[in-house]
Image (cartoon, helix red, strand yellow):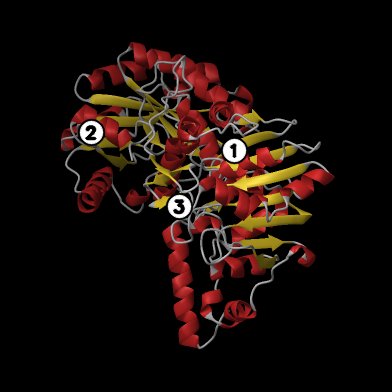
């Protein structure tokens, strides 16, 4: 999968022929924003001043350098290097300048990157950097963090935004590369503040950006504040949304040096993420790709590139079209018919017409896909006097765009299906007849469902890919999230009849039954919050299987971040454990 943003590694490969491995070096300069005893400083900065983990414990600068190079050679087979003066802030005084020159003479670095602050860039510092740039390519990593003076004051940054802007322009005019650091999640800031920071930086002559999520670390002023009154922090899903928006506002030629902050586990207080660093990057790439977002598509007048869809259209037996999904290796619908499946597996057992006759119906369509379930529901809602309000959750915007081009609107349809799909693709909302409406939310349903209000939906349609391909949406933990948004008389319907799924629904607090078979021997599943809403109870032998055998172990995803493989592996390990212990369903 091609990256939707310009990764720093790809930039270096293009610029230098191969990636430069950064060799972090700590001159122990200290920080001009701290007192002589080390107190003070930015509220988020610990006593290490962001020194690299792999150099902790090393002695002299030369020892640090050799240790870091050894680390890069052994772990990454590195061949070219960039010296990275990382910890605290360089002040470029006369006593410091020989250290740089001696260091760069001692090893064949391709470039040097120096972390500093706007208030450290004196005329003398600019002169030194220009002279150094004549001998080796110089990058200046400038700690900007935010463009909002109220926040800079709040975190005791020690300089204002104007000094950062002046420094950026001055470095550029002198022919020096400037990479800016920005933090998302600083105390008191909102999504609008992050957008303003991104837009302001994007309009300046910067050469790269390094994005951090705020960490509250031990030994910081923020840690003391957090102990008195817990500060809000961004968990992985929320941070990803702000991060993607930030990246989209950056010029497309600006490399993104970093997506997240690194902190030693023993030093981190909050946030405690459950995604690994690599998994988080993969998630961001997946989400941006599925939503057709790219770096720069919110910058200036650039428009997102859309329409690059690769879905194989397949005609089903009832004449309706479905797609083959190459990633999941499955069709979106049964060969018997996409329209047939929508009506007989969801609308009829959900008694949509009867519900509409009594009043407005709120429907949650999880995994919208080509839209047959929702579009067919709009047809059912055409005659009654009460409206149908549909909220659809879908991760892949591309499938909706492709469906708008391929789906057939029949003469008997009272709604224009193609137009509705096109409107959803473009604006995330569409209207049917009789004041009925659909709004669609892009993203991982495990996350987007958490933003829906409690006790809202009369019906929930769950139409994810199979349990072996898409187990993320068949877990007991996800079912609990769905239960929260359902009304007391709400009903959940799905085509899936797998034992672990029904077991998970039972454990989540649902009453569970069956629906009539359509296109296959087994029926689907009906789950409700009231027992009297279950018309076909589960067979006795199946209930025994759920209660007494390891087949009744549900899929689990306690933090809502596990991958499909992790969920399947966890369940298999629990099955083995049960068999070893001679138990059934723990």
Q: CA distance from mark 1 to mark 3?
A: 28 Å
Dot 3 crowding, Cα within 10 Å, few <14, some 14–19, many 20+: some
Q: Earlier in the sequence, mark 2 or mark 1?
A: 2
For this view, does 107 lie left or right of residue 568? left
Is residue 497 visible in the rendered image? The answer is yes
Q: As rendered, which of 382 and 298 lies closer to the eye?
A: 382
Q: Position of residue 382 (x, y in %)?
A: 72, 36
3 and 2 marks in contact (CB < 8 Å)? no
Relative to 493, is 419 above or below?
above
Q: Number of numbered discs present?
A: 3
Q: Which mark is residue 509?
A: none
Residue 408 to residue 554: above or below: above
Q: Which residue is mark 1?
A: 441
What is the secondary structure assignment of the residue under circle 1? strand
Residue lying at the far top in this picture: please name it.
173
Q: Residue furthest right?
A: 358
Residue furthest to the front in view is 411
Label 2 – label 1 distance at C-alpha: 37 Å
Dot 2 crowding, Cα within 10 Å, few <14, some 14–19, many 20+:
few
Which residue shows up at 56% across the image and 38% down it? 40
Which residue is at 69% across, 41% downward?
380
For label 3, the residue is 335
Of the image marks 3 and 2, the number of the one nearer the N terminus: 2
* Residue at 50%, 31% in the rendered image: 404
The quadrant of the rendering that contains the N terminus is: top left
- Is the Cβ of the residue at disc 1 closer than 8 Å to that at disc 3? no
Residue 308 spot, x, y in % from top left: 38, 31
Q: Is residue 221 visible in this depiction of the protein? A: no
């Amino acid at each position: 999968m091609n990256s939707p943003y310009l990764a720093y590694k790809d930039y270096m490969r293009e610029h230098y022929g191969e990636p430069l491995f950064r060799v972090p070096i700590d001159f122990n300069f200290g920080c001009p924003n701290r007192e002589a005893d080390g107190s003070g400083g930015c509220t988020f900065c610990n006593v290490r001043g962001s020194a690299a983990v792999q150099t902790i414990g090393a002695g002299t600068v030369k020892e640090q350098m050799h240790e870091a190079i050894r680390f890069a050679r052994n772990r990454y087979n590195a061949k070219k290097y960039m010296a990275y003066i990382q910890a605290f802030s360089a002040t470029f005084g006369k006593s410091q300048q020989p250290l740089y020159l001696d260091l760069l003479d001692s090893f064949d670095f391709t470039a040097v990157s120096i972390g500093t602050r706007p208030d450290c860039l004196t005329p003398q510092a600019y002169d030194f950097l220009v002279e150094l740039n004549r001998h080796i390519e110089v990058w200046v990593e400038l700690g900007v963090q935010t463009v909002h003076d109220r926040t800079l004051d709040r975190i005791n940054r020690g300089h204002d935004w104007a000094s950062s802007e002046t420094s950026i322009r001055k470095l550029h005019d002198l022919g020096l590369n400037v990479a800016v650091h920005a933090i998302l999640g600083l105390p008191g800031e909102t999504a609008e503040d992050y957008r303003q920071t991104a837009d302001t930086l994007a309009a300046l002559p910067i050469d790269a950006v390094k994005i951090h999520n705020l960490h509250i670390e031990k030994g910081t002023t923020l840690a003391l504040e957090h102990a008195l009154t817990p500060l809000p922090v961004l968990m992985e899903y929320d941070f990803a949304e702000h991060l993607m928006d930030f990246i989209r506002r950056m010029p497309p030629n600006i490399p993104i040096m970093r997506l997240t902050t690194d902190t030693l586990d023993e030093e981190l207080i909050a946030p405690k993420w459950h995604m690994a660093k690599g998994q988080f990057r993969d998630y961001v790439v997946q989400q941006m790709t599925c939503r057709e977002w790219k770096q720069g598509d919110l910058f200036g007048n650039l428009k997102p590139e859309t329409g690059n869809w690769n879905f194989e259209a397949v005609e089903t037996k009832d004449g309706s079209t479905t797609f083959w999904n190459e990633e999941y290796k499955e069709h979106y619908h049964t060969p018997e018919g996409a329209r047939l499946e929508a009506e007989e597996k969801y609308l009829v057992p959900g008694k949509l017409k009867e519900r509409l006759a009594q009043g407005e119906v709120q429907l949650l369509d999880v995994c919208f896909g080509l839209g047959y379930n929702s579009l067919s529901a709009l047809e059912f809602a055409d005659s009654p006097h009460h409206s149908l309000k549909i909220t659809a959750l879908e991760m892949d915007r591309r499938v909706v765009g492709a469906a708008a081009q391929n789906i057939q609107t029949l003469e008997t349809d009272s709604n224009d299906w193609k137009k509705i799909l096109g409107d959803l693709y473009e604006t995330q909302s569409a209207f049917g007849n009789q004041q009925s409406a659909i709004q669609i939310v892009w993203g991982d349903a495990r996350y987007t469902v958490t933003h829906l209000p409690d006790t809202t939906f009369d019906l929930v349609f769950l139409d994810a890919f199979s349990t072996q391909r898409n187990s993320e949406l068949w877990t007991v933990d996800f079912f609990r999230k769905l239960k929260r948004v359902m009304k007391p008389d709400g009903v959940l319907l799905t085509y899936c009849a797998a034992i672990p799924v029904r077991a998970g629904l039972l454990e989540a607090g649902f009453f569970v039954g069956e629906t009539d078979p359509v296109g296959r021997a087994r029926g689907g599943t009906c789950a409700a919050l009231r027992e009297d809403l279950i018309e076909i109870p589960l067979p006795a032998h199946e209930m025994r299987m759920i209660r007494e055998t390891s087949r009744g172990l549900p899929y689990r995803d306690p933090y809502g971040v596990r991958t499909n493989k992790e969920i399947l592996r966890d369940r298999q390990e629990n099955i083995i454990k049960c068999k070893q212990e001679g138990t059934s369903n723990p």
